[in-house]
Amino acid sequence: MRLAIAPVVLVSLAASLTACSSASAGGTKDAGSAGDGKAGRTAESPATVTVTPRGQDAEAGHPVKVTAHGGTLTSVTVTDDRGRTLKGSMEPKNMVWVSDRKAVPGASYTVRAATRTKGGTTGTAEAAFGTADAGKVNKTDWRPGAGATVGVAQPISLVFDNPVANKAEVERQLRITTSNDTEGSWGWVRDWSGRDRVDWRPKTYWRPGTKVTLRAELNGTDSGTGGGWFVRDYSTTFTIGARQVVKVDLDRHRLTLERDGETVREIPVSGGTPGGDKRSWRGTAVLMAKEGTINMNSETVGLGNAYDKMVDQSMRLTWSGMYAHAAPWNSRHMGVANRSSGCIGMNSADAAWVYRQVRVGDPFEIKGADTKGTVEAGNGFGAWNLSWKEWRERSALD
């Protein structure tokens, strides 16, 4: 909701307005003085200026607006208390200037404006205002990290600490640029943690070598009810690596690594045990992290006391606990039957090889007749299991 603020007119405040004619201070000529041959007349007054917001406790989240009355604006400078300048643009006829960014919480601003009337009289004006503190602050965690090289299925993902009711307003502040004009869309999902999350994925897998930059210009944006204010911007730049796709056929008990459309290697695997909660997920799961040797405890994924062991070459595929990893205890079932507790198990040597080959962001395309469903969008990076139309519908702007 836009704050209604009565404009402040900068015309009578000696400390904040300086006006001068277009003539020099020492050579001003009275229009009615002797020798000009004209009847006396009143000198033209300079234009007046109004600025919003105003005061020292104004609400943040609104652009700074400077308006000239009785003339036009020739220049406007808005500077905050840290010496940063707000960029902005003139509206038609140069009577109004509006900042590109919004005033942020807990900041002080100085506004300087220069004006000119139709008759050529110039003037300068200065004003100051401050914004109220944020009170409640919202923060975000994002992936991938700056400087990373990731696989062709890696989305850009932002998870927010607090609820985001103003989804459209937040989404408008997110800027994606790519080196080859990749088509893509934001989509809102419920993260596995229960928090609000927004991901950006391309229409199809990324083209290898693409340079991607995210600029989340969120400072001064209100999350909405229960969310609080954003008080900083975020940015990251990363690169897309080689096109690698891991295809897992649970019916054939085989994992195939493809690179640039060519099969690199096929190895035997054992997936989740059919007929119950130990079944694997199907669909496209994106490699989230290479976690190495970790402790896996079935109680953390709702499977009681099924297992509690150290596992090598662990590659996380979902937040709900599906991994690809070494499973030497299950060797007799590799390539023969699905007998795991939901993960994709391999012999130690095969798992070590896969671990060396894959990178975060590589897609694992999993299929099988007896699975427990498709990986959801918020369970890891499951956005690829939605059609392009379905994904675009999750944008708050489309």
Image: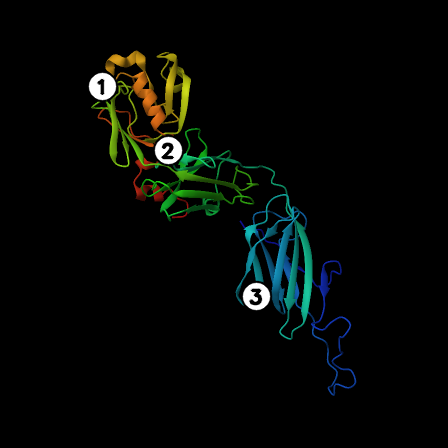
How far is the residue under mark 3 from the one under mark 1?
A: 73 Å
**For residue 32, which quarter of the picture?**
bottom right
User: Is the residue marked by circle 2 packed among few (<14), some (14-19), or many (20+) residues within 10 Å?
Assistant: many
Residue on which the image places disc 3: 94
Mark 3 vs 1: CB contact within 8 A: no
Judge whether 128 appears above or below 257 on screen: below
Mark 3: which secondary structure? helix
Give me the C-alpha separation between circle 2 and circle 1.
26 Å
Judged by depth in the image, the label closer to the viewer, 3 or 2, is 2
Residue 361 numbered tag: 2
Q: Which residue is mark 1?
A: 335
Q: Is residue 182 above or below residue 26?
A: above
The answer to whether residue 6 is visible is no
Question: 7 left or right of 235?
Answer: right
Q: Tell me which corner region of the image, top left, top right, bottom left or bottom right, holds residue 355.
A: top left
Can you see residue 95?
yes
Nearest to N terminus: mark 3 or mark 1: 3
Element marked by disc 1: loop
As measured in the structure, the alpha-carbon distance from the residue carrying label 3 to the one carrying label 2 is 49 Å
